[in-house]
Image: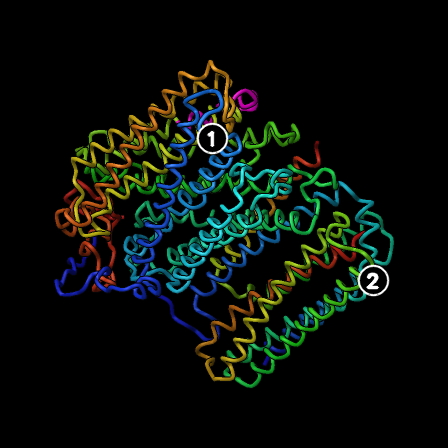
């Protein structure tokens, strides 16, 4: 039943990180607010992906299917911003 | 040729299929995230001012509900991999309840917004807010519909340690819905 | 290439045997689904073609004639939208891809046969909604640019919903093919022993899965803007019309590679067979398919050079656009090298393949004029652009499609086409195509803008020439379709392997049985060992 324990631990970490990110949002850190929020969100996402979605124990092909689309998403963001940010 | 090892989960075709589908969902929501970035960079004051109108408390509560629903879903899959039918059914029911709670809170939030005269057409922030949370909510409803069907099949005894592919595939979809919210929450509610 | 003998038992029914609406509407057989897509997509080819003929009729005269300006705008919108979304994008992948991917890799069906059927029905519902939108005809052009598309009273919302569903069908088909190619190849068929059509279809499917959702969200946002009054793309509400264009072209550029990669895959199959030579540079062709697919995601801004996009973005996109020519050029040189010193038979599939190479070179090279910032300012949105994309889409994709149809007609139907009619049709098509579209390069250079129903008189002579060309082209297509229909009933019975091809579909009966193969073959070699007595050890 270590799977259950592991999931519970991941969940606890996710709740703690949620508390942290909400707490930080009440402070005024200027531009750092955005960075902290996104970094914490990404950590949460990583935990969900690795443990709840089993990516930690997946074969390489599935990992490729999970990661490659992120690059394409990066492309549309980068390409669009290269226009809107430099008009 | 594929061999099905119950301890490794669903057959590889199913896993490849669902991850390919999640890729499409990533790009679907990705367009919205791109629009968010574009407008946020262009209208920082608007976003700061408007995002304060959202209830951080309700947003946090919703985040906790969804994260917990991912826990229950993952637990359900682990259970059926060991043939635990009853635990799977309880897990699915709990996941459904938590998802319903999420939708309930969303309903409250939206009603509040409407009663304060905040509509999608009010400004670009709320336009994005309603479309992003709306599309996300639609995905929650779709997920719940599939889970009701899974629960019905589980009660019929369709799933076992040897065969639980639909459960695992739905689980992956559900975690993805959770992932989208993990980013929506700070972007809409927390960053000013 | 296969160690198994042909499995024609003679008493096994072929996939066409079972009759009745139910047996087609509820089929899980990839071959039947492919045939249904074939009929659906080619119906829209014919309708879209008739629309084009009407457009060309109007353009015989520079002034008002035949139809109002508004009607003209509606016609070119319909022509573009139908041809692109309902014909060219699904034509090869969903029909020939569906039919032949399992056969070429030695499988009995695709990975998810039920999903395949649902994809077809989603496609049908999408078509019905799209056609219903004709009740309030749209005149935005197939590109639906905002703000006009967000504000016009015509059925943009309905069309968006229809297109969303058509896109869903495309996504699910691509997903199905990706998983099929990864997991269902026959034993011994390593990636480097796959037919090149499969490599092309793989690249195509990856693009379909990753790019189509973006046009999906574009339609969602457009509908949200129309129904909810949000100003994403409306400058008056703080929105950005270029955001629409970025989202639109992020899909619509890669989608041209969805159109061309399957066609290139067909060329890679046809040329070795009819030159009796192994394909030159197998790996280069395989990898260039993937390269074209990937680079295709990097260049969408080249549709927006004159839209008001930043100089930074314009320069970056123009620079990246040149790279896509490289893997394309590699393919073309490899096909030509395959032909060199081959034993060439000019059967109709080969004629179309040769036409493809010639016409696609013209289409591709003219893309360079459009990809270069400075020259693009002069020729964009003129008839030069119209000629460029017709040379690539019709001179390229459609010639490839026709090559595939002629090559695989015996396998699909069990009948041979009439070669004389096929060659005659080919001649009309190739001559007609060039007479129609080459003058447009000149018209564009001379400054004639696209999407105008009326034009300055000086452009009339070349317009008349183009219209006459369209009549020759139409005659050719008519003869070709007549050949298909007639040969279905009266064509000679096709043998299993009329072309002596080495790919797996030629080891089964024409038409194939439901199960494709009596026993799944074991693969020991690549499928291009033509003219060699010894087996190549690969």
Q: Position of residue C208 (x, y in %)?
A: 47, 49
Q: Which residues are magenta?
A: C363-379
Which residue is denoted by mark 1 in the rendering? C67
Query: Height in image: C2 above or below C59?
Result: below
In the shown orientation, is residue C258 left or right of residue B188? left
Prevailing SS of the magenta stretch? helix
Q: In this rendered view, identify the residue nearer to me: A77 or C405.
A: C405
Figure quadrant of residue B99? bottom right
Query: Height in image: C227 above or below B4?
Result: above
Please tell me how crowded label 2 is: few (under 14), some (14-19), or many (20+) other residues with Cα within 10 Å.
few
In the shown orientation, is residue C179 left or right of residue B103? left
Q: In this rendered view, identify the residue nearer to me: C54 or A39.
A: C54
Q: Tell me if label 2 and label 1 are in contact, CB under 8 Å.
A: no
- The mark lying in front, picked from 2 and 1, is 1
Query: Height in image: C35 above or below C379?
Result: below
Q: Position of residue B130 (x, y in %)?
A: 71, 56
Instruction: Examine the rendering and report whether any part of residue C386 can be seen.
Output: yes
Residue A23 is labelled as: 2
Q: Which residue appears at 54% of the width and 37% of the height? A: C139
Chain to which the residue tagged by mark 1 belongs: C
Instruction: Examine the rendering and report whether any part of residue C521 can be seen.
Output: no
Q: Which residue appears at 44% of the width and 38% of the height? A: C79
């Amino acid at each position: 039943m270590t799977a259950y324990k592991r999931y519970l631990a991941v969940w606890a970490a996710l709740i703690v990180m949620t508390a942290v990110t909400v707490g930080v949002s009440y402070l005024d850190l200027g531009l750092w607010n955005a960075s902290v929020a996104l970094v914490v969100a990404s950590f949460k996402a990583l935990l969900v992906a690795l443990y709840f979605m089993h990516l930690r124990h997946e074969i390489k092909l599935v990992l490729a299917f999970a990661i490659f689309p992120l690059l394409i998403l990066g492309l549309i963001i980068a390409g669009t911003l290269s226009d809107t940010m430099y008009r | 040729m594929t061999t099905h090892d119950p301890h490794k989960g669903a057959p590889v075709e199913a896993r490849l299929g669902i991850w390919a589908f999640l890729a499409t969902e990533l790009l679907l929501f990705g367009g919205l995230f791109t629009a968010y970035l574009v407008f946020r960079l262009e209208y920082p004051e608007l976003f700061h001012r408007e995002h304060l109108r959202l209830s951080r408390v309700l947003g946090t509560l919703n985040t906790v509900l969804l994260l917990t629903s991912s826990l229950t879903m993952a637990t359900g899959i682990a259970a059926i991999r060991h043939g635990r039918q009853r635990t799977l059914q309880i897990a699915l029911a709990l996941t459904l309840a938590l998802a319903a709670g999420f939708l309930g809170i969303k309903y409250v939030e939206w009603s509040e917004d409407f009663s304060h005269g905040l509509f999608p057409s009010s400004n670009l922030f709320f336009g994005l807010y309603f479309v992003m949370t709306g599309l996300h909510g639609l995905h929650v409803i779709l997920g719940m519909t599939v889970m009701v069907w899974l629960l019905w099949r589980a009660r019929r005894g369709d799933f076992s340690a040897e065969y639980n592919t639909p459960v695992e595939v739905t689980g992956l979809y559900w975690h993805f819905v959770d992932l989208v919210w993990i980013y929506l929450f700070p972007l809409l509610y927390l960053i000013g | 290439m296969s160690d198994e003998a042909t499995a024609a038992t003679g008493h096994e029914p072929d996939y066409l045997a079972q009759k009745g609406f139910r047996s087609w509407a509820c089929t899980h057989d990839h071959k039947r689904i492919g045939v249904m897509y074939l009929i659906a997509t080619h119906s829209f080819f014919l309708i879209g073609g008739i629309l084009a003929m009407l457009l060309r009729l109007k353009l015989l005269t520079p002034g008002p004639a035949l139809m109002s300006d508004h009607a003209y705008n509606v016609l070119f919108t319909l022509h573009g939208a139908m041809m692109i979304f309902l014909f060219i994008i699904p034509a090869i992948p969903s029909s020939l891809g569906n039919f032949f991917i399992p056969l070429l890799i030695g499988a009995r069906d695709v990975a998810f046969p039920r999903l395949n059927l649902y994809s077809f029905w989603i496609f049908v519902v999408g078509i019905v909604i799209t056609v219903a939108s004709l009740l309030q005809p749209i005149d935005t052009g197939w590109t639906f640019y905002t703000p006009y598309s967000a504000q016009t009273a015509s059925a943009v919302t309905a069309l968006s919903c229809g297109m969303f569903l058509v896109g869903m069908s495309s996504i699910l088909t691509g997903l199905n093919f990706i998983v099929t190619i990864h997991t269902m190849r026959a034993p011994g068929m390593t990636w480097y022993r796959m037919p090149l059509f499969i490599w092309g279809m793989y690249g195509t499917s990856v693009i379909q899965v990753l790019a189509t959702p973006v046009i999906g969200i574009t339609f969602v946002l457009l509908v949200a803007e129309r129904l909810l009054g949000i100003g994403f793309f409306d400058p008056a509400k703080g929105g950005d019309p270029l955001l629409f264009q970025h989202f639109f072209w992020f899909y619509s550029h890669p989608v041209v590679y969805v159109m061309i990669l399957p066609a290139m895959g067909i060329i890679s199959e046809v040329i070795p067979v009819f030159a009796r030579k192994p394909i030159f540079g197998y790996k280069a062709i395989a990898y260039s398919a993937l390269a074209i697919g990937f680079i295709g995601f990097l260049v969408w801004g080249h549709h927006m050079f004159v839209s008001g996009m930043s100089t930074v973005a314009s320069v970056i996109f123009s620079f990246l656009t040149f790279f896509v020519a490289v893997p394309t050029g590699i393919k073309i040189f490899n096909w030509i090298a395959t032909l060199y010193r081959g034993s060439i038979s000019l059967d109709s599939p080969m004629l179309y393949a040769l036409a493809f190479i010639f016409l696609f070179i013209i289409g591709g090279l003219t893309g360079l004029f459009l990809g270069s910032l400075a020259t693009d300012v002069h020729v964009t949105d003129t008839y030069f652009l119209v000629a460029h994309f017709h040379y690539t889409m019709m001179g390229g994709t459609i010639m490839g499609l026709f090559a595939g149809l002629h090559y695989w007609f015996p396998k699909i139907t069990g009948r041979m086409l009439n070669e004389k009619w096929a060659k005659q049709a080919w001649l009309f098509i190739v001559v007609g195509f060039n007479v129609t579209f080459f003058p447009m390069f000149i018209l564009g250079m001379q400054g004639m803008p696209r999407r105008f129903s009326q034009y300055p008189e000086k452009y009339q002579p070349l317009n008349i020439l183009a219209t006459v060309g369209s009549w020759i082209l139409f005659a050719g297509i008519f003869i070709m379709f007549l050949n298909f229909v007639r040969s279905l009933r009266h064509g000679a019975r096709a043998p299993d392997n009329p072309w002596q091809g080495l790919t797996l579909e030629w080891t089964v009966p024409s038409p194939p049985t439901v199960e494709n193969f009596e026993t799944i073959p074991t693969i020991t070699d690549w499928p291009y060992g033509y003219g060699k007595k010894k087996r190549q050890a690969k």
